[in-house]
Amino acid sequence: MLRPVRKQSLSDAVFEQLRDQIVSGELSPGSPLPAERVLCEALGVNRGSVREALRRLQQSRLVSVRHGGTSQVLDYRASAGLDLLAALIVSPAGRIDTRAVRAIIEMRSALAPDIARRAAERGTADDADALDAVTVRMAACGTHLPALQELAVDFWSLLVDAGDNLAYRLAYNSLRATYDQCRELLTQVLAEELDDAARYRAIAAAVRAREAESAARLARELVERGERAVKQALAHLTPAEEATR
């Protein structure tokens, strides 16, 4: 059921509510969205808010607008992009979607080695200096995991930039936006990876030396530590703690 939006002119709230119903299957692929007038009445907002929300749903490839202005729900698994990941990580009920977390971690593990490889192949001395600077700051943090976590995000962002691959940059942006949704939950889980200062330094050194395969191997070893830890943590979640998407 649709629920009234408490604040007027909040197209974000309308968008998120309709998006969640599409992703959860309450609004099934191929079904029409209610007419604008019906949405306005049900949600308690004006037509401008509804139209803006529908425009964003179309841009996110969650609905298609047919001739005459009617909107049809699309199968998001076949049409949506990585930008939807951030919305999938936590259900409307506030539960972590373990399938989404697992997918993100596996994608990260798949991309990380090639990101490091490209950085070693294409990176400049300035890129290597920036990576070294982050590892120095990591060493200064000791075992303070939240600070290490923030610096690790910076380290990977620098690697992506050094690799000069626009597709990787856009994918990284989406993964980071998703990661930010559950960062605090993963801080302790990723402790073994975040605290591996030697391997971060080794990746930076491989980039400086242009040792592409060594950089890829080290990056794979680093993120696989995190992947194992996350999957072990997910395995201990009870069914009640998982989202129903």
Image (cartoon, helix red, strand yellow):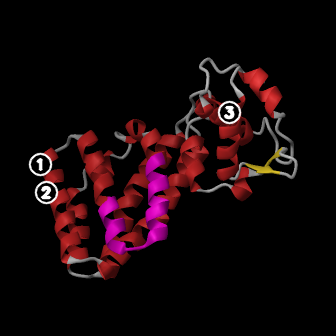
Tell me which corner region of the image, top left, top right, bottom left or bottom right, holds residue 7.
top right
Task: Quote the CA–CA distance across marks 2 and 1.
Answer: 6 Å
- Circle 3 sits in a helix, a strand or a loop, which is it? helix
Badge 2: residue crowd in 10 Å (few <14, some 14–19, many ≥20): few
* Residue 120 in the image: above or below residue 95: below
Where's residue 14, x and y in %?
A: 66, 31
Task: Quote the CA–CA distance across marks 2 and 3.
Answer: 51 Å
* Residue 149 in the image: above or below residue 91: below
* Residue 38 in the image: above or below residue 81: above
> Mark 2 near mark 1, Cβ–Cβ under 8 Å?
yes
Q: Is residue 245 visible?
A: no
Residue, disc 2: 136
Q: Name the amino acid type tagged 3.
A: Gly
Residue, disc 1: 140
Which label number is shown at residue 19? none
- Circle 2 sits in a helix, a strand or a loop, which is it? helix
Q: Earlier in the sequence, mark 1 or mark 3?
A: 3
Q: Is residue 162 magenta?
A: yes
Residue, disc 3: 48
Residue 216 lies left or right of residue 25; in this view the side is: left
The segment highlighted magenta reads: 156-177
- Circle 1 sits in a helix, a strand or a loop, which is it? helix
Viewer-closest of 23 and 72 = 72
Identity of the residue drawn at 62% across and 56% down: 81
